[in-house]
């Protein structure tokens, strides 16, 4: 039977016709990011930010479509929605990293536009010229976040929004005769034939049933066998997602499957990272489409990441994120992960501080950073948290609930580098503000009864002291330096929150940005340059007395940065 299916796979859908000669050239292993969107021209360094998915693996098959190899890093979905309504993109505002690709689409071939992003810098990069291809890495995150590149196959991939809508309305299921050929390979457990048939049959005009997509995910992408088959399954899923984006009713995965994959040992599921990337892509594409339609309540994110309806799922994402940052591993029992992230005794902290017990890989200076794969997982999970913060009607309420859960984890993360990885990779500026505000409240003897504002930052500067746990043997001045770094990060995120109207719902925010409405600043939120100088001088004197030695240069640099940010905010 398997041999018969193999012959069917070679002959395709043409009955007794002799097989077509395979003269297609294998695509280059690396591709240059080409900007077809009309956005700013990429810098030379940014144009090299393409991650090689095939590094260390076998070559792509000869019949692999040359036009399917990478896609663009996305940007702010709000700005996408504004563009789709024919509005000019505003000069200012919060610019998130996700955006849709622009391009053209014809049956059997694709042309995706691409914009630029920064790179995490762990995998090899290349700038060799080629047609635009699929990329397996992550969406760029604006400074001061971790940066990387990722595909974005949004519904705008067929020439324009209107042409994509027309193409989607005309799409029909794969004909029953061809579908029976696919089913026969599935029954005979011949995944190579299944993937080959689907790659040939899926087009702008024809889409596979939900059950077929689910089979590819569960039985091929999430199989225990590593290698070329996983990449082929991933590329097929991304092709289907580009041409026929998943909806809440037709998505091929559910939360139960995601939970199983994230909790299972990685050795048993080598395709976990590819699956997580596919999950985030389906969430993102559907989120962008429903945002343009102003119908987020029907989105996949609303179904699985709503803080109002399924907050337990959001809590799980936070746990997975902490596990990825600290290197504890997803497959450890939940109680063990929580105990390791939130130690309750001095003895446990002392044990964890030993060099042999530290997770992840340490550099020569003792700092610890997530491994490259963990970096990708961190960025993907942070994107899920960003959607969870925005999908409900009140981002302010959602981020309050999320910050309350995140706070004890961040408070007890033992290494500074891990805390920095967690906080700087956070996509939602509003969520970052809430988490940092809780940390500073915890470090103050008397919390301020003020809303987040520049005067409250000055209050933190005067009354805060470093109380975070340290297991990387940092000296005292380095703890104060981290506190200053968190203050700077808080001010930067606060600036984005105010200018981007991030406390408002997405639909309200779109209207505010379109109308170019300026943010409202209360009189009590204003500070004078004289107040800033006074607080800076008072802090420097207090720190000099505490340390008993001249201030190190890193402290001076961060104090100057804080003063500059305060002056910028005050004006």
Image (cartoon, rainbow, N blue to C red):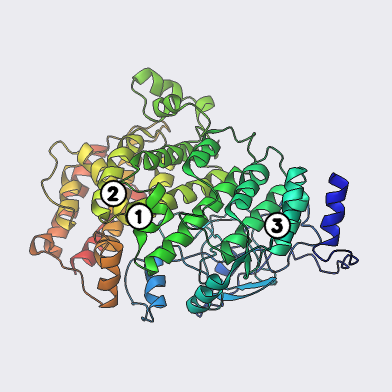
Residue 295 can be seen in this image: yes
Frontmost of labels 3 and 1 is 3
Quadrant, the N terminus: top right
Residue that lies at the very extreme toward the top in this rendered image = 347
- Mark 1 is surrounded, within 10 Å at the Cα level, by few (under 14), some (14 to 19) or many (20 or more) other residues, namely many
According to the picture, the residue beneath numbered tag 2 turns out to be 399
x and y percentages locating residue 262 in the rendered image:
52, 38
- Neighbor class of circle 2 (other Cα within 10 Å; few <14, some 14-19, many 20+) is many
Q: Is residue 85 left or right of residue 47?
A: left
Of discs 1 and 2, which sits in the foreground? 2
* Nearer to us in this view, 435 or 259: 259
Task: Give the residue pinned by disc 3.
Answer: 179
Residue 373 vertical position relative to residue 113 in the rendered view, above or below: above
Lateral position of residue 202 relative to residue 457, left or right: right
Q: Are marks 1 and 2 in contact (CB under 8 Å)?
A: yes
How far is mark 2 from mark 3, CA to CA?
45 Å
List x then y, in percent, for residue 277.
55, 52
Q: Position of residue 398 (x, y in %)?
A: 28, 49
Identify the disc placed on residue 30.
none
Q: Residues at badges 2 and 3 in contact (C-beta under 8 Å)? A: no
Residue 558 visible in image: no
Q: Position of residue 547 (x, y in %)?
A: 27, 38
Badge 3: how crowded within 10 Å, few (<14), some, or many (20+)? some
Residue that lies at the very extreme toward the front in this rendered image: 176
Taking the spot 87% from the left edge, 54% from the top edge, the residue there is: 7
Direction from residue 396 to residue 7 in the image, left or right: right
Q: Secondary structure at mark 3?
A: helix
Dividing the picture into quadrants, the one containing residue 290 is bottom left
Quadrant housing the C terminus:
bottom left
Q: Earlier in the sequence, mark 2 or mark 3?
A: 3
Residue bearing mark 1: 428
């Amino acid at each position: 039977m398997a041999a018969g299916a193999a012959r069917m796979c070679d002959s395709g859908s043409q009955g007794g016709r002799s097989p077509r000669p395979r003269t297609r050239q294998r695509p280059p292993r690396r591709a240059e990011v080409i900007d077809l969107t009309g956005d700013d021209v990429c810098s030379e360094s940014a144009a090299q930010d393409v991650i090689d998915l095939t590094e260390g693996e076998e070559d792509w098959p000869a019949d692999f479509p040359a036009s399917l190899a990478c896609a663009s890093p996305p940007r702010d979905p709000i700005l996408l929605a504004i563009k789709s309504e024919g509005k000019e993109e505003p000069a200012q505002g919060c610019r998130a990293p996700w955006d849709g690709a622009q391009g053209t689409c014809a049956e059997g071939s694709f042309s995706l536009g691409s914009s630029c992003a920064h790179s995490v810098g762990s995998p090899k990069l290349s700038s060799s010229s080629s047609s635009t291809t699929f990329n397996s890495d992550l969406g760029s995150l604006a400074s001061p976040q971790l940066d990387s590149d990722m595909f974005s196959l949004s519904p705008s991939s067929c020439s324009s929004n209107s042409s994509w809508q027309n193409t989607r309305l005309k799409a029909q299921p794969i004909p029953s005769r061809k579908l029976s050929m696919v089913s026969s390979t599935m029954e005979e457990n011949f995944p190579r034939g299944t993937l080959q048939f689907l790659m040939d049959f899926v087009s702008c005009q024809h889409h596979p049933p939900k059950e077929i997509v689910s089979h590819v995910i569960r039985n091929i992408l999430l199989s225990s066998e590593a290698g070329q088959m996983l990449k082929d399954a991933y590329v097929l899923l991304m092709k289907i997602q580009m041409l026929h984006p998943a909806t809440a009713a037709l998505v091929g995965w559910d939360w139960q499957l995601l939970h199983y994959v994230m909790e299972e040992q990685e050795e048993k599921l080598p395709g976990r990272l590819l699956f997580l990337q596919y999950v985030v892509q389906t969430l993102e594409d559907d989120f962008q489409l429903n945002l343009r339609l102003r119908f987020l309540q029907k989105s996949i994110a609303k179904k699985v990441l709503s803080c109002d309806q399924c907050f337990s799922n959001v809590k799980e994402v936070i746990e997975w994120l902490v596990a990825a940052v600290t290197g504890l591993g997803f497959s450890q029992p939940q109680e063990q992960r929580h105990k390791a992230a939130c130690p309750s005794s001095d003895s446990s902290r002392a044990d964890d501080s030993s060099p042999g017990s530290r997770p992840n890989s340490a550099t020569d200076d003792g700092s610890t950073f997530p491994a490259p794969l963990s970096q990708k997982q961190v960025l993907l999970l942070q994107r899920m948290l960003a959607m969870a913060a925005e999908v409900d009607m009140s981002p302010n309420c959602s981020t309050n609930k999320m910050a309350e859960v995140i706070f004890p984890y961040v408070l007890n993360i033992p290494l500074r580098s891990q805390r920095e990885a967690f906080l700087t990779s956070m996509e939602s500026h509003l969520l970052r503000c809430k988490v940092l505000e809780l940390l500073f409240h915890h470090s103050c003897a008397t919390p301020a009864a003020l809303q987040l504002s520049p005067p409250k930052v000055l209050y933190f500067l005067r009354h805060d002291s470093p109380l975070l746990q340290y297991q990387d043997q940092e000296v005292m001045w380095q703890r104060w330096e981290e506190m200053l770094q968190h203050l700077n990060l808080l001010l930067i995120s606060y600036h984005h929150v105010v200018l981007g109207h991030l406390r408002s719902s997405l639909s309200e925010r779109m209207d505010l940005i379109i109308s170019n409405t300026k943010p409202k600043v209360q009189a009590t939120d204003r500070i004078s340059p004289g107040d800033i100088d006074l607080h800076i001088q008072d802090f420097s004197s207090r720190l000099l007395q505490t340390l008993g030695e001249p201030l190190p240069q890193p402290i001076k640099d961060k104090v100057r940065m804080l003063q500059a940010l305060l002056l910028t905010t005050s004006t």
